[in-house]
Image (tube, coloured by chain):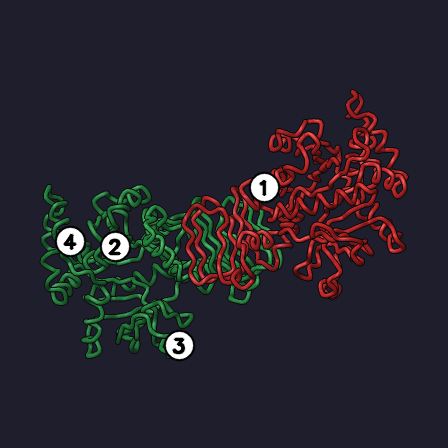
Chain colours: A red, B green
Amino acid sequence: MTVHPVVMAGGSGTRFWPLSRKARPKQFLALATDRPLIVETVNRLRGLATPARTWVVCGPVHARAVRRLLPRLPAANVIVEPIARNTAPAIGLATLQVQARDPDGVLAILPSDHHVADVPAFQAVLRRAAEVAQSGALVTIGIKPTRPETGYGYIECGAPVEASAGVAVRRVKRFTEKPNRELAEAFVAARTYAWNGGIFLWTARTLTNAIKEHCPAMAPLLERIADAYGTPEFDCVFAELYPQCENISIDYAVLEPRSVKGEMGSEIYCLPADFGWNDLGCWSALHEHVADCGPEELARKNVFDKSDQPCINIDSRGNYVYAPGKAVALVGVNDLVVVETGDALLITTRERSQDVGKVVAELKQAGREDLV
Amino acid sequence: MTVHPVVMAGGSGTRFWPLSRKARPKQFLALATDRPLIVETVNRLRGLATPARTWVVCGPVHARAVRRLLPRLPAANVIVEPIARNTAPAIGLATLQVQARDPDGVLAILPSDHHVADVPAFQAVLRRAAEVAQSGALVTIGIKPTRPETGYGYIECGAPVEASAGVAVRRVKRFTEKPNRELAEAFVAARTYAWNGGIFLWTARTLTNAIKEHCPAMAPLLERIADAYGTPEFDCVFAELYPQCENISIDYAVLEPRSVKGEMGSEIYCLPADFGWNDLGCWSALHEHVADCGPEELARKNVFDKSDQPCINIDSRGNYVYAPGKAVALVGVNDLVVVETGDALLITTRERSQDVGKVVAELKQAGREDLV
């Protein structure tokens, strides 16, 4: 069995402003460790897949950074979308590339900007998922929910179909994107729901057929682009046809339609897993990761992330400060998120840090593209 | 009548850290306007006294800065204390210098780091105070209290002795340094108390005699230093004798003993005044000055002091931010004081900003003199 990881690096997240910028989105930042998240994502695959079989999808602004950070990947494995079209076209295109070489190879679709604490557990789940995928199924990895998060997608799982090597395989009953608080609480209480972490496995053949079935307009466009790959016309064909593809996520394009059918017995499976996943969705998620403690201790102490200068704390607690190279003093403040970069300063709270995207929107509106 | 202003610039205040530092204390910062406070202090005297008759007392670290900022002052008018000895020795020494040239000249002792909004009113009060001082009295300027501040000294005034040109002259009954909250409230309610703004006027002869009377140990030391002034031995004599002077404020050394006697009819007067005084005692005092509005509006809006970059406000109010040259974003935070300099970042609240001195103390304890 051959695994072909496809690392999705097209994101241009704004929630880590001012550290993240258009030219340097989250996946290129060394947030969780001292290496960029995308580098950790590829390193995490060691032993599971070779760099020669690993693909990265990204935007034109980031192609150079990807090649510089991942020098062992063949340059041709970096698929540079001429324009962002969400995940379905990008995954579809990567699938057709693999299909041409290894139609029964298993693709592993992976976000480039999440953190995984327990790499052996992650690899064990992925191996099992790849085996299930090889039988022709669509496979998702379900993250064990730890709180009623309303910002994630949830996967409702049926009874285990089988379990081996400590990994259960469950049939997917339904996908629910971003539930309200009440629903999220019910999902967590029910214990049959998992978070959708954006990790999917399937063979090239399975997904090619699924795209033909569910995206009849997109499939021929992607085929013509894939056919041109490696020819002098490629750039031209790619630039012309790719923007015509529907701007849609793989979840909406393929997984949800299949899961509806699935209730009657289809072929989407979920492998619920618990490998210390953190999507680092905003500064307060990073705060929790860096603090590496329970919520009570988190509220008592301060985190001075990547600090190499004195940090003075007077009657302050629960704060997260990212201001490398600066002396920092907190006097009588609690539960703040403070981020300082060369040209910008953000002050928010743990509760409001997910609203940082609004700052980026306002800066854009003010014509300050240089700051976003 | 000749007025000899003596600008007290020996302070090494820490409450504007991280902007203020050992080498650049508050009086050298352009806090209230775009000119350093000490420059504004001297400019405020135009028409009242000439630079040739204006004296500045400062420490050795600051002599160069004083001469650079006040180039019209004769270099000899900058009295450089070899070591800080509080205000009594410094004022005593300046008094002896003036005594040698103009024994009936009036000295006007002035803090170097306060703000005055209404300069004509300030000058009118000072002129009247100088007239009263010329008769041989010790004269203080009383600032009209606007709140029960516990950090200031209070002057209890008796009935007006006389009033002319809209300026009342009252006999001083008592000085009370930093009362508790209850007492401060009673003082403000009584309407017979004024804040001690550290502005004093007297003739050289009057104060020379007062120092001889109240500081019998200090007087001969100061006389020997003054005698050496302008001779080759001066530096040596100054360095040897000045540290032997008692480390005491002019308030404790002369004014309070005199005021006790004064209840029986002595010669300390207070001219209560209201000229838009602000001692800029901490960041939140500067916040109020810059906001230039009532407390309710202050709590509603944000002040981005000296900002030339975008400042984004999302659901935030009552904040003061000093971060020139940086884009700043506030998301869901209230009543904070945020100060950013090249090497340091302070986050505190309006209520706690007077505790910033504790940060400086901790940095010193940590051996980081480079940051204080």
Badge 3 local density, few (<14 within 10 Å), some, or many (20+)? Answer: some
Label 1 near label 2: C-beta < 8 Å?
no
Closer to viewer: mark 2 or mark 1? 1
Q: Chain of mark 3?
A: B
Vertical relation: A38 (above or below) B19: above
Q: Do discs 1 and 3 share a chain?
A: no
Mark 3 or mark 2: name the one nearer the start of the chain.
Answer: 2
Q: CA distance from mark 3 to mark 2?
A: 33 Å
Q: Which residue is mark 2?
A: B6
Inspect the image, locate mark 2, and give the three-letter code of the amino acid beneath it.
Val
Q: Do discs 1 and 4 share a chain?
A: no
Label 4 near label 2: C-beta < 8 Å?
no
Picture coordinates of residue B152, whole percent (x, y): 34, 67
Mark 2 or mark 4: name the one nearer the start of the chain.
Answer: 2
Q: Chain of mark 2?
A: B
Q: Chain of mark 1?
A: A
Q: Do discs 2 and 4 share a chain?
A: yes
Inspect the image, locate mark 1, and give the three-letter code of the amino acid beneath it.
Leu
Badge 2 local density, few (<14 within 10 Å), some, or many (20+)? Answer: many
**Label 2 element class:** strand
Which numbered dot is residue A29?
Answer: 1
Which numbered dot is residue B242?
Answer: 4
Q: CA distance from mark 2 to mark 1?
A: 56 Å
Picture coordinates of residue A120, whole percent (x, y): 62, 45
**Label 4 element class:** helix
- Compare residues A89 and B70 and report the one nearer the observer: A89
Label 4 near label 1: C-beta < 8 Å?
no
Q: Which residue is mark 3?
A: B185
**Label 1 element class:** loop
Label 3 near label 1: C-beta < 8 Å?
no
Left or right of A219 on screen, residue B296: left
- To which quarter of the image does residue B301 belong? bottom right
